[in-house]
Image (cartoon, rainbow, N blue to C red):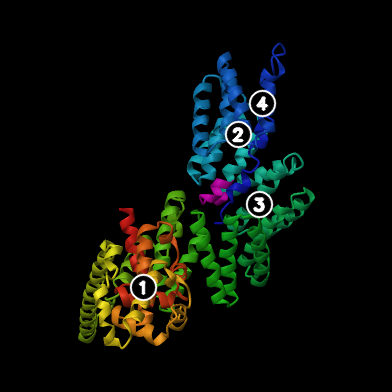
């Protein structure tokens, strides 16, 4: 069953309300204090909720001061239109409570309308249906024909959503007859009724009638200056072409609709179009392209967790596709997504779900999910060779797990050592007496002293953070040669020049990560660049070589420590 896009149908709900209640000000009071003035200012500023709230509250305060129940209901109603749906429900409940013994043409009628609308938007169609029934009862009692048919139309739409297709069609036909006679006064309701009627004809397999309504709706959208609406009929006709197995025409229509819905942000209809385009492309033999369309259905479901029952099939298609190509990770992914979809469907379509869930019911999905996760077992253990293979595989897995556990333990120990280490502990204290050992490297004591003094300054000024440092460049700055510099670093620092530079950079990086909360949020590439490395690869390699763990692991563990 195609989803009746709820936000389209309720966009002009307030059209009825704004014109339904007259506000007669007291001629003896000042203009700015009259109910009529405050109401008019509220409606004039309704899009500016801050300003509108000011006038709504002034209206409500005045009504409470006058102890006027109906005016109080007006104030609550104004506020319910400019607040969240949760708060709107509370205001509507207040209206119903205070007007239960008054029962005017306006109240509690519009409170029922508000609650029906809010439940509709939330996808709680059962409660929306109940309140549209109450709205219809009040509209009939007070002979409010516009609201009467408005409620009937939405009752028909919800019937279609819940799978009551035959009775939905009867109701929508009745509404079509009414709105076709008033299409100039209520163009949006006329077009939305045509749209819903087209869907109802399609689901009832009256495809020629659906095509007639789609063509009529397309033309009427243009005549009534609502050309954006024509793309909804293009969508419905694309689906109709698919049902008629006219796949080329279906593909063309669906692509046109998709282009429009991408622009206007109508994700619900976009998901519907992707679903049928996927089915159409599959029928044309473009399986890979079809799979991409079904993936887009899932992408939209992740953004707006509402889904029509028929689009559930996208997940079955994706699961079978990845099963056939042996991709268990994606197979598991879409099984889990389908379980989530079924949860939503059970919540919103509990009257319909039992007829929809056929090939992948919940118990089977859960079983399949466990089977994939525990892929060591096979459904058919028919030979001792297979059993032995499974045993060996299990043993290897245990050994691998133990190896990884030891490795993680080692990494954690190394991290703890680095985390607790004090920066001062790492500084080498080369005693002056050690200079006398200069003879061991065949360099004069004076030159050794100068080089060591410069290296100390080099470390303190953090010149090692500069990019592309070479031993030749550094030797020139010291007024010595690279051979002497290399010997001094090898002998006194106990490491090569490149290791010496990289270790300074890595030690600096570790201390900065431990003390600078902004620095820890950098990417590994950005950190590498910041401390003098030319690439994240060389940085990671040096970090691991010198410290025994990867920088990504160190950062991850450090973030845990900072949270604690």
Q: Is residue 115 above or below residue 409?
A: above
Quarter of the image for residue 537 reads: bottom left
Q: CA distance from mark 1 to mark 3?
A: 85 Å
Residue 172 in percent (x, y) is at: 63, 46
- Which of pointers 4 and 3 indicates the residue nearer the eye? 4
The magenta-colored residue range is 157-166
Residue at the spot of label 4: 39
Q: Please say if 529 is above or below 87.
A: below
Callout in the foreground (2, 4) = 2
Check disc 2 and report the residue beneath it.
50
Outermost residue on the top side: it is: 28
Q: In 3D space, how far apart are the residues under numbered discs 4 and 3 (Cα atoms)?
A: 34 Å
- Percent across and percent down for residue 116 are 54, 38
Alpha carbons under labels 2 and 4: distance apart: 15 Å
Q: Which of the image's four quarters has the N terminus?
A: bottom right
Q: Is residue 160 located in the magenta-colored stretch of the structure?
A: yes
Residue 453, numbered circle: 1
Could you tell me if the residues under marks 4 and 3 are in contact, i.e. CB atoms within 8 Å? no
Mark 3 falls on what kind of element? helix
Q: Residue at x 60, y 59 (%)?
A: 270
Name which residue lies at 32% across and 78% down.
545
- Counting from the top left corner in percent of width and height, residue 38 is at 66, 24
Query: In the displayed image of the protein, which residue is found farthest to the right?
Result: 223
Q: CA distance from mark 1 to mark 2?
A: 68 Å
Looking at marks 2 and 4 on the same chain, the residue that comes earlier in the sequence is marked by 4
Mark 2 or mark 3, which is nearer to you? 2
Q: Residues within 10 Å of mark 3 (few under 14, many from 20)?
A: many
Give the numbered dot on residue 195.
Answer: 3
Q: Position of residue 398 (x, y in %)?
A: 21, 76
């Amino acid at each position: 069953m195609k989803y009746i896009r709820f936000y389209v149908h309720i966009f002009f709900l307030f059209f009825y309300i704004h014109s339904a209640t007259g506000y007669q000000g007291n001629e003896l009071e000042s203009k700015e204090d009259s109910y009529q003035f405050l109401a008019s200012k509220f409606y004039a500023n309704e899009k500016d909720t801050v300003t509108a709230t000011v006038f709504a509250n002034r209206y409500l305060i005045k009504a409470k001061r006058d102890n006027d129940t109906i005016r109080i209901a007006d104030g609550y109603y104004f506020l319910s239109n400019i607040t969240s749906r949760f708060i709107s429900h509370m205001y509507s409940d207040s209206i119903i409570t205070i007007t239960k013994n008054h029962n005017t043409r306006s109240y509690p009628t519009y409170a029922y309308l508000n609650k029906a609308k809010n439940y509709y938007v939330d996808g709680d169609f059962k409660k929306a249906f109940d309140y549209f029934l109450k709205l219809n009862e009040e509209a009939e009692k007070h002979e409010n024909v516009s609201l009467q048919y408005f409620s009937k139309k939405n009752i028909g739409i919800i019937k279609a959503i819940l799978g009551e297709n035959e009775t939905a069609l009867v109701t929508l036909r009745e509404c079509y007859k009414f709105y076709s006679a008033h299409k100039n006064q209520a163009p949006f309701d006329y077009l939305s009724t045509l749209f819903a009627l087209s869907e109802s004809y399609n689901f009832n397999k009256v495809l020629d009638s659906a095509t007639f309504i789609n063509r009529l709706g397309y033309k009427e959208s243009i005549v009534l200056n609502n050309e954006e609406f024509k793309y909804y009929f293009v969508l419905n006709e694309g689906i109709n072409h698919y049902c008629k197995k006219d796949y080329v025409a279906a593909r063309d229509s669906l692509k046109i609709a998709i282009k429009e819905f991408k622009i206007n942000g109508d994700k619900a209809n976009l998901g519907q179009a992707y679903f049928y385009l996927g089915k159409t492309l599959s029928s044309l033999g473009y399986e890979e392209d079809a799979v991409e369309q079904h993936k887009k259905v899932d992408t939209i479901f992740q953004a707006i967790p509402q889904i029509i029952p028929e689009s559930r099939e996208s997940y079955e298609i994706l699961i079978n596709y990845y099963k056939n190509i042996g991709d268990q990770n994606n197979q598991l992914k879409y099984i889990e997504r389908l379980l989530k979809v079924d949860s939503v469907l059970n919540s919103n379509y509990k009257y319909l779900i039992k007829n929809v869930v056929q090939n992948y019911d919940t118990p089977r999905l859960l079983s399949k999910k466990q089977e994939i996760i525990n892929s060591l077992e096979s459904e058919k253990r028919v030979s001792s060779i297979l059993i032995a293979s499974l045993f060996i595989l299990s043993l290897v897995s245990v050994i691998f797990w133990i190896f990884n556990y030891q490795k993680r333990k080692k990494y954690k120990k190394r991290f703890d050592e680095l985390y607790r280490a004090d920066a001062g502990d790492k500084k080498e204290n080369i005693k002056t007496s050690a200079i006398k050992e200069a003879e061991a490297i065949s360099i004069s004591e004076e030159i050794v002293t100068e080089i060591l003094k410069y290296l100390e300054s080099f470390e303190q000024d953090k010149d090692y953070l500069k990019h592309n440092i070479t031993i030749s460049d550094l030797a020139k700055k010291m007024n010595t040669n690279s051979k002497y510099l290399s010997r001094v670093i090898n002998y006194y620092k106990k490491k090569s020049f490149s290791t010496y530079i990289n270790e300074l950079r890595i030690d600096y990086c570790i201390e900065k990560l431990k003390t600078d909360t902004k620095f820890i949020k950098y990417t590994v590439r950005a950190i590498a660049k910041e401390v003098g490395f030319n690439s994240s690869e060389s940085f990671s390699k040096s970090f691991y070589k010198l410290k025994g763990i990867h920088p990504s692991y160190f950062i991850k563990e450090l973030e845990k420590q900072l949270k604690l």
